[in-house]
Image (spheres, rainbow, N blue to C red):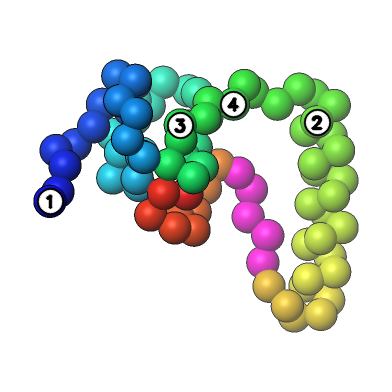
Amino acid sequence: MTHPPLDPTSGDPRRLTYEDYVLLPDDGKRYEIIDGELHVSPAATPLHQKIAHTIEMQLVRRLQDAGLGEVYDAPIDLLLHRNT
């Protein structure tokens, strides 16, 4: 049985899915669904951004040099599982 779309802010206890995620408001908050639960993260601090940038630059260099992959900046949708 399929459930009707959920308002993820309603407090409904069922496990959330990607379908629920796409219904979240575009209000500047960072929403994630992890193991079916809604998580909201605050904006990163300047120190966090600086550290993340340093790590990213090293990853980019090493991956490009070895031809192993690409690095993308957040935010980017990534669907690992229907509930995550």
| Residue at 75% from the left image edge and 80% from the top image edge | 67
Q: Is residue 46 above or below residue 19?
A: above
Find the distance from the CA under tag 2 to the CA under tag 1. 44 Å
- N-terminal-most mark, 1 or 4: 1
- N-terminal-most mark, 2 or 1: 1
Q: Nearer the viewer, mark 3 or mark 4?
A: 3
The verdict on residue 10 being magenta is: no
Q: Which residue is mark 3?
A: 38
Q: Position of residue 6 (x, y in %)?
A: 23, 32
Q: Which residue is mark 4?
A: 41
Q: Position of residue 9 (x, y in %)?
A: 34, 21
Q: Which residue is mark 2?
A: 48
**Mark 3, secondary structure of its residue:** strand
Identify the magenta region.
70-74
**Mark 1, secondary structure of its residue:** loop
Q: Amino acid at mark 3?
A: Leu
Q: Nearer the viewer, mark 2 or mark 4?
A: 4
Q: Amino acid at mark 1?
A: Met
* The image quarter in which residue 22 lies: top left
Q: Main secondary structure of the magenta part?
A: loop
- N-terminal-most mark, 2 or 4: 4
Residue 22 in view in this figure: no
Find the distance from the CA under tag 1 to the CA under tag 3. 22 Å
Find the distance from the CA under tag 3 to the CA under tag 4. 10 Å
The verdict on residue 72 being magenta is: yes
Q: Residue furthest bottom?
A: 67
Q: Nearer the viewer, mark 2 or mark 1?
A: 1
* The image quarter in which residue 53 lies: top right
Q: Amino acid at mark 2?
A: His
Q: Which residue is mark 1?
A: 1
Q: Position of residue 36 (x, y in %)?
A: 43, 41
